[in-house]
Image (cartoon, rainbow, N blue to C red):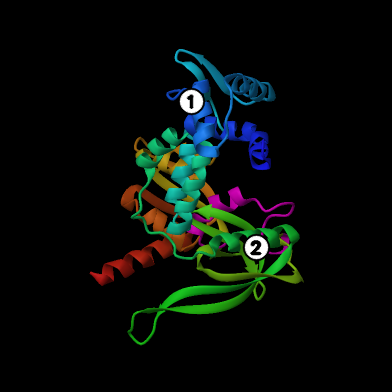
Amino acid sequence: MNRETGSKQKLKLLYIIDILTKKSDEEHVLSAADIIKYLNDDYGISCERKSVYDTVDALIDYGYDIVKSKSPRGYFMATGEFEIPELRLLMDAVQAADFISPKKTKQLLKKFSGFASEYQFLRLSKQIYIDNRNKCSNENIFYNIDTLNTAINSKKQVEIVYVRRKIVDGSQAVFDEKVMTVNPYALIWADDHYYLVGNHTKYDNLMNLRIDRMKSVTVTGTRARSFSEVSPYSVSFDTADYVNKHLSMFSGDIKPVEMICRNELIETFTDKFGDKCYMRPYDDNSFISKVNVSVNEGLVSWIMQYGDGIKVRAPRELKKMIIDKSNAILSLY
């Protein structure tokens, strides 16, 4: 036996794992003869049936979920790292995420193929793959996320080159770059975008920055300002609470808001603010609710999309914002 053949024989166990993972499932049972053929055709390894039996038994003893089928006689890998419904959820999420570029989307979906048999993955791909979404073109987003995560964990400031479009002299939109130093606190996926929640070093409040608009991110050697100095959180930054109180990731002061809503909006309301928020019957057709949220343009837009289905009772500031927005829209027509 030459050295190359001997080396491949030592890898036989790993190759059998790959064969069972990629080529088998409940509907595609592999016999010992099938496994021997794949070993020979794909890896150039010759093998006897007894060796296959012994190897598969060893894998089962180790903990691999390999099922011995009696009809048809053979083996298949019952589960991988992910069950098929779990894999479907992950693939759907990647496909739906606007902040993941088309190139990276295809790369991630291809990587998922290693967690299911070829047949299962083919069926999944046919069901979910859509390539006509609006996807971001920033290929640096994954590197930026990694850099920001490092900065948050090490409590360091970051220097960000932030890009926005603007119209100049009536021409088409051009990109405008702005450099800022930020104290980073949390990464949040909301409304189909990925955000950094942080504090601009020039101010004393929180800000939300789209990560797909970051041209570059650099960790500095300066220690970041504590979030307890610019937010209501003291022990840890509560991302769930922050998202619930900042609709569409607009910044603004947190205030008690009182609204009267039509009964048919109760599910919509609890989806947005949680099922533990204050809600009581108001009359036969509506309920009253009180929530603590950020009063900003995001909240105004969310309320106005339901027309006369929601009426704001307090605060007066929010009522005025809605009236002003309504009048501004009316003046356009």
Q: Which image quadrant: the C terminus?
A: bottom left
Q: What residue sits right under mark 2 in the picture?
A: 147
Span shown in magenta: 228-253
**Residue furthest out toward the left:** 333
Give the quadrant of residue 223.
Answer: bottom right
Amino acid type of disc 1?
Answer: Asp
| Viewer can see residue 271 | yes
| Viewer can see residue 210 | no
**Residue furthest out toward the top:** 70
Label 1 or label 2, whichever comes before in sequence order? 1
**Residue furthest out toward the bottom:** 169
Q: Is residue 205 above or below residue 238?
A: below
| Residue drawn at (74%, 62%) of the image | 155
Give the quadrant of residue 254.
Answer: bottom right
Q: Does the residue at mark 1 contact the one at mark 2 (Cβ under 8 Å)?
A: no
Amino acid type of disc 2?
Answer: Thr
Q: What residue sits right under mark 1 in the picture?
A: 34
Give the quadrant of residue 146.
Answer: bottom right
Residue 313 coordinates in the image, percent (x, y): 44, 53
Q: Which image quadrant: the N terminus?
A: top right
Could you give the CA–CA distance between mark 1 and mark 2, rounded to whole angstroms? 46 Å
Q: Within 10 angstroms of label 1, few (less than 14), some, or many (20 or more) residues?
A: some
Q: Comparing marks 1 and 2, which lies closer to the viewer?
A: 1
Residue 287 coordinates in the image, percent (x, y): 42, 40
262 and 245: which is toward the camera? 245
The number of numbered discs placed on residues in the rendered structure image is 2
Q: Within 10 angstroms of label 2, few (less than 14), some, or many (20 or more) residues?
A: some
Instruction: Verify whether residue 246 appears in magenta.
Output: yes
Horizontal placement of 239 versus 163: left or right? right
